Amino acid sequence: MKPKERMAIQRQMPRELDPAERITNFDEVVFGFDEETAVKEANRCLQCKKTTCRDGCPIHNDIPAFIKLLREGKPEEAYWKVRETSSLPAICSRVCPHEFQCEGSCIRGKKGDPVAIGMLERYLVDWMRANDKNIMQSCALPKDKKVAIVGSGPAGMTTAFYLAHEGYPCTIYDSLSVLGGMLTVGIPAYRLPRDIIEAEFAALKNCGVEIVPGVTIGKHKSVQQLKDEGFDAVFLGIGAHASRKLGVDGEDLEGVLHGVDYLRRVNIGEKLDIGNKVVVVGGGNVAIDVARTALRQGSDKVFILYRRTKEEMPASMAEIHHLEEEGVKIEFLAAPVKIHGENGRLTKIECIRMKLGECDASGRCRPVPIDDSNFMIEADAIIPAISQDVRHMDDTETSFDTTRWNTYEVDEVSLQTSVPWIFAGGDAVLGPQTAAKAVYQGKVAAESIRRYLEGEDLHAGRMPEEEASEEG
Ligand SMILES: Cc1cc2nc3c(=O)[nH]c(=O)nc-3n(C[C@H](O)[C@H](O)[C@H](O)COP(=O)(O)OP(=O)(O)OC[C@H]3O[C@@H](n4cnc5c(N)ncnc54)[C@H](O)[C@@H]3O)c2cc1C
């Protein structure tokens, strides 16, 4: 096919569940491509010499190579090409904010729509499943040094994945009864069906990874105890699970729930009746997930309060589009200043109008309150979803250096903490970020732990991720 012909093909759009139908359940909203659509979309790729898409992918998947295999009619080979660099393609293809990563760096996006890289990756995963193909890689013979992994989110899953495939017996501990970290207790099932996550755990177990839910390290046993029990190294992938507070009066009233706490309860299976009129505060994906979950839980007057404008919303455009389709309104340039209540229960939220003030170097403008612009909103519930912090282990035996953002201080190349046999990665190091960044750090930590266990130099031939990307 000539480049001109490729350029003429329009970006293919996936089918989606009808908004009226989907808000009644947690079924997956976006359908995958069929073969014809996938090949048509793959044909839009220009196979650029400078692989900017690959640089934009936090895991550096060889995107042009897998797209080429796909359009040559080799979906299984294309899947294994992705697996060369990614431990969790089934998950990343569905939840990565592609517009800010690979697709945001696709050369076709400079003039028109980028190639739908995420949907093509998903097609391969769905094809493997539909054709009953084995997604398990061969496992190495067990070695005698073993590793404990704290946290079963994408960082912990990835560390276990790479170490287990090298033959190091791994045990994953998680304080929750369900596995997958924020993939399971944060991201709703209508964006990431649970059987996709379960298949990844089945693959890990197949490689001998032991999984122990319901054990909180720092409470039920300390990190030092893990070492005393015979683990030679420990990886901390405990995420960022403490909801950030609004810091306004009335935040302790009944009817105020915090974003990730609310999602965790719903995702674990609790049926929460939070009333009809729900106000969600925030402009990121968590706020959108909360609002769309509240709709599906039966609240029919849900809206979002955001202190900047649509252009500044950190949420992805696709998520904002889905939210609006489902009937959720966003009140822009407004922020809560006080929560009012009666008999210990919230009744109204006092808000103030904002305007955009000075902008920083990145062009992001500061919201500034407008004097005497206060107004009231009656509500049954308010759910602030304005970010999360790391909830550190309650472990007095081992002390770790932390940063001024209260994340773990780690060596930027090896992800080793201030305690040599302990490594950390994912949101616990980066602050709330993305699944793909947690996957990448899990992979880096696994290589560091391997070197540590083999007595090799942790730094030789490696460089911090930022410098590596600049060179790439
Ligand atoms: C609502 C929501 C939506 C999101 N949407 C997206 C999205 O669309 N795309 C995307 O890429 N990213 C998204 N993210 C972010 C993404 O989920 C996280 O960046 C990612 O899961 C971080 O991985 P992690 O392994 O570092 O931590 P987590 O996934 O948070 O896992 C940490 C695990 O550690 C366990 N743990 C904590 N402390 C202990 C302890 N002391 N002992 C034992 N276990 C412990 C926790 O129970 C948890 O299971 C979203 C996050 C949220 C909250």
Image (cartoon, rainbow, N blue to C red):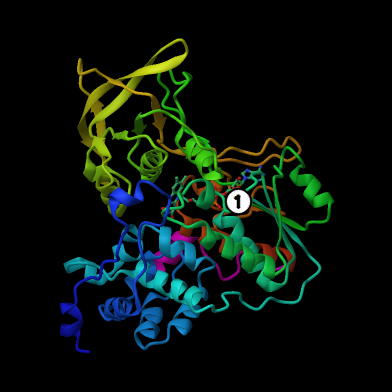
- Work out whether residue 457 can be spotted: no
- Work out whether residue 128 can be spotted: yes
Spot occupied by residue 435 in the image (x, y as percentages of width and height): 48, 56
User: On the rendered image, what quadrant is the C terminus found in?
Assistant: bottom left
- Which SS class for mark 1? loop
Spot occupied by residue 399 in the image (x, y as percentages of width and height): 69, 39
The crowd level at tag 1 (other Cα within 10 Å; few <14, some 14-19, many 20+) is: many
Q: Is residue 19 above or below residue 112?
A: above
* Residue drawn at (38%, 82%) of the image: 70
* Residue drawn at (57%, 56%) of the image: 155
Indicate whether residue 422 is drawn in magenta.
no
Q: Is residue 321 above or below residue 12?
A: above
* Residue drawn at (62%, 38%) of the image: 392
Where residue 210 sits, quadrant-wise, is bottom right
Q: Main secondary structure of the magenta part?
A: loop
* Residue drawn at (46%, 49%) of the image: 187
Left or right, 5 with reference to 250: left
Residue assigned mark 1: 237
**Which three-letter amino acid code belongs to the residue tagged 1?**
Gly
Where residue 200 sits, quadrant-wise, is bottom right
| Nearer-the-camera pick, 382 or 66 | 382
| Nearer-the-camera pick, 61 or 405 | 61
Q: What stretch of residues is rendered in magenta?
A: 455-472
User: On the rendered image, what quadrant is the N terminus found in?
Assistant: bottom left
Spot occupied by residue 197 in the image (x, y as percentages of width and height): 54, 60
Cβ of mark 1 under 8 A from ligand 1: yes
Spot occupied by residue 34 in the image (x, y as percentages of width and height): 34, 75
